[in-house]
Amino acid sequence: MKLTGAQLITQLLERQGITVVAGIPGGANLPLYDALRDSDIRHVLARHEQGAGFIAQGMARVTGRPAVCLGTSGPGATNLLTAIADAKLDSVPLVAITGQVPRAMIGTDAFQEIDTYGLTLPITKHNYLVRSAAELLEVIPEAFRIAASGRPGPVVIDVPKDVQNEFVTFERWPEPGRAEPQRQPADEDIARVAALLGEARRPLCLIGGGVIAAGAATQVELLAQKTSLPVASTLLGLGAMPHDHPLFLGMIGMHAARATNLPLEECDLLLALGVRFDDRATGKVAQFCPQARIVHIDVDASELGKIKQPMLGIEADVAAALAALLPQLRPRPRREWIAEVAALRAAYPLAMPGSECPCEPYGAIRQSAACLGNDVVVASDVGQHQMWAAQAFPFSWPRQWLTSGGLGTMGFGLPAAIGAALAMPERTVVCFSGDGSLLMNIQELATAAEEGVNVKVVLLNNAHLGLVRQQQQLFYGGRYHASRFHAEPDFAAIARGFGVSACDLGAVAEPLAVLHRALQEPGPGLVNVPIAHDANVYPMVPPGAANREMIEGASHASAA
């Protein structure tokens, strides 16, 4: 067989099962785009490379399989960086293929030349600068293997233009790159976990994104039921256990309900599964779970003891560990501990003022959820709306919730929602966004219109960087600066300008009926929800404080 490097890339992607890629062409990757014309791979033309990166993330997050984005050299590659870094922080399997100037021009400051290899070194699991077309036969499958193996993450393949045009002759196709078998736990470690769980009087399980990545959600539910184990979740673990399970406590951390954070103060054993103890979850880490012995199970050995020293750290895939653990456990009713947790939940429920009104933050989320049902995929941007959605949306299944947890990237939501809709066209995707976040990738409304994806943007519009304003109010003595948008664009008109249907709940007599109609229409849509400028998300743990020091606003005090 004799193919160019560009033809080789497209056919190797096809052999990996890739059917959709997102990207933008430019001078240095035009040979690849020329080869894509002859491929069955569907190309989604994003309006910004960051949007392309997050579209690919949306596909990867909702399926658990590696997804691909493309960019040209120079600004094309630098525009992808935020999406790549975001994938690294949240362990998302992403393969980014960038064009590069011809080999002979590397290092000459040629037009649109940038050191993509050097720039992506600290934000990827692995990266390549391909030196010959023949290397692609090894590099492409290996990139997919690395992206999907162990703790998933991003891989960058930088391909000079002349390598894309170079012919290579070969006799056999390489095998597609697949995830390596997951690491199994040691028998003695699992026996020790079983013994510790048996001894504990007040155990609690904390689940994170690693549970979803491992496909261990069902096993977590079995573990909870068998041992009467209350389960709390990090932001990225939401959906791994149904919101209405009697043993599920909700999200821990900075914006958790008091009834979720307080049991962590009381537990005597914390079984941490696929979590990394980040500061938004733990608060002041030295005071996190002060009475508990900690068992930490994670596929990434570097996370064990990195932030919170466990009594027992186990490097293993969570699903493999639970498969070995479950047969060793005997049913335990733990009536006293369950009653104590239930009393805390009764005393300190999460207050959701305005949840019946679609023009209030909680109401926009709860009423959207009631309209869309359990099958909907939920994306969010970053800010107050992200926390309102995390608190209030009734998540029911793994990979239902797509949000930027580690990097906290404003502008993530809309393109990630488009990616999810491309990967799962049978489902509706709702994206809860804020005006500050949406403006950071609003150009992707054109992509949504062009692709006809079933994405609904519910825009909680307070004309502010709401979480910045809230922190300036609470922790900077009300000295507001650069958190107010004095120009308030007409988002419904902007959406229509991109070819997306839109409505404004602030301008209609029956907002609930209008919301329901908008969410049920096929194709992309935007619902502008004007909310109070001074609406805050509570509870809130002050930055650097312990989780027990959460503060609550007047609305919560009156509603509780």
Image (cartoon, grey):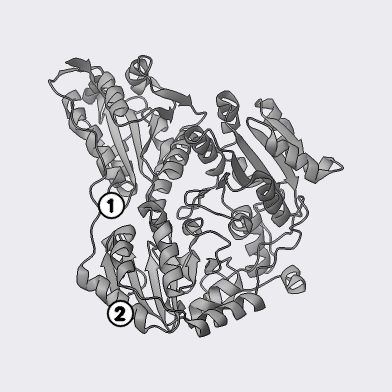
Q: Is residue 345 left or right of residue 117?
A: right
Residue 249 shows which numbered tag?
Answer: none
Q: Quadrant location of the C terminus?
A: bottom right
Q: Residues within 10 Å of mark 2 (few under 14, many from 20)?
A: few
Q: Residue at x 39, y 29 (%)?
A: 71
Q: Nearer the viewer, residue 273 or 114?
A: 273
Q: Residue at x 66, y 56 (%)?
A: 481
Q: Is residue 352 left or right of residue 62?
A: right
**What residue type is disc 2 on?**
Ala
Mark 1 is surrounded, within 10 Å at the Cα level, by few (under 14), some (14 to 19) or many (20 or more) other residues, namely: many
Q: Quadrant of the N terminus?
A: top left
- Residue 45 vs residue 67: left or right? right
Residue for badge 1: 150
The picture places residue 498, in percent across and down from the top left corner, at 65, 27
Q: Amino acid at mark 1?
A: Gly
User: Would you identify the image quadrant in which residue 411 lies?
Assistant: top right
* Helix, strand or loop for disc 2: helix
Against 515, is 70 above or below? above
Tell me the quarter of the picture where residue 144 sits: top left
Which is more foreground, mark 2 or mark 1?
2
User: Whole-Å distance between the Cαs marked 2 and 1?
Assistant: 27 Å
Q: Are marks 2 and 1 in contact (CB under 8 Å)?
A: no
According to the picture, the residue beneath numbered tag 2 turns out to be 195
Decide if residue 419 is in sight here: yes
